Image (spheres, rainbow, N blue to C red):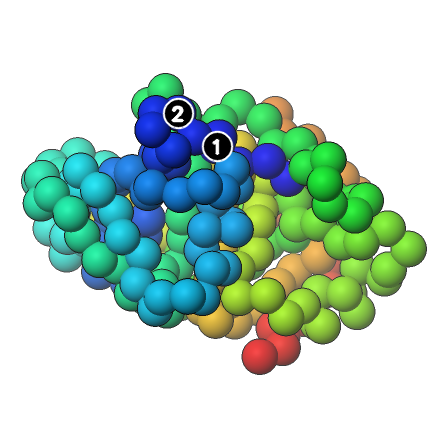
Amino acid sequence: MEAAKATENGALRVEIHTGTYIIFGAVQTRHERLIDVLENLSSPYLQVENAEVLPLKTGTGRNGFRSVGTLMISRKDIRLALPYENGSVLSSGKAHPQYVPKYPVPAQLFMDIMEVEGNIYVREGEDALAATQNMTMPFLAVTHANVRYLNETLSSPFTASIAIVNRDFVNLIALRREPLDPSNSRLEQLLAQSSNLGVRLARKSK
């Protein structure tokens, strides 16, 4: 799965969601993929330059950001991260050539403050349910993602071609049988059709 490549001076443009803030800015890195940046455990903090911050409690949606310059974000508090390029979320998620072959598994992730629906990826030859339960990396990439806050006054529902989710905040994962059609993947449709698609619930393993 491919995240935003460096656009200027080795910087990835990102949008970060914590439990109390949405942050937009740039991360200086040699990595091409945002998930690799987040899983770099050399520091407990992620440094974001040219940061703009929106307190979720303001309930002003995705507008009203204020500039704060350089910001240090605790990695363990990140719920969701979105890679950006040229000011917009990437339009497609693809298999990264240097990684082992994987296949997409349509899933819905139930978190403490939001729900994320999209495709997660499992190594070819592995059972999807077993692989999901045995995941060990702290962050999980979801492509063709639909994101909905449980309290929609904090942020309106939105879509992203790829979203990085912190597994520590995922309480339940629902798996579907059929590949997700990115042109027809609303959360409401998944919930309405779940009885026909054989949804299975799997609690995240720590």
* Rendered residue at 71%/57% (across/down): 175
* Rendered residue at 63%/77% (across/down): 205
Residue 145 picture location, percent across and down: 53, 40
- Label 1: state its secondary structure: loop
The amino acid marked with disc number 2 is: Thr
Residue 15 is drawn in which quadrant?
top left
- Pointer 1 residue: 4
- Pointer 2 residue: 7
Circles 1 and 2 in contact, beta carbons < 8 Å: yes
Residue 83 picture location, percent across and down: 43, 37
Please state if 33 lies on the left or on the right of 123 as rendered: left
Determine whether 90 is above or below 199 in the image: above
Placement of the C terminus among the 4 image quadrants = bottom right
Query: Which residue extends farthest bottom?
Result: 206
Q: Residues within 10 Å of mark 2 (few under 14, many from 20)?
A: some
* Residue 28, numbered label: none
Q: What is the C-alpha distance between the residues marked 1 and 2? A: 8 Å
Which residue is at the front of the view, 51 or 9? 9
Placement of the N terminus among the 4 image quadrants = top right
Q: Count of labels shown? A: 2
Determine whether 128 is above or below 171 in the image: above
* Rendered residue at 35%/34% (across/down): 11
* Rendered residue at 51%/37% (across/down): 32
Residue 195 picture location, percent across and down: 73, 55
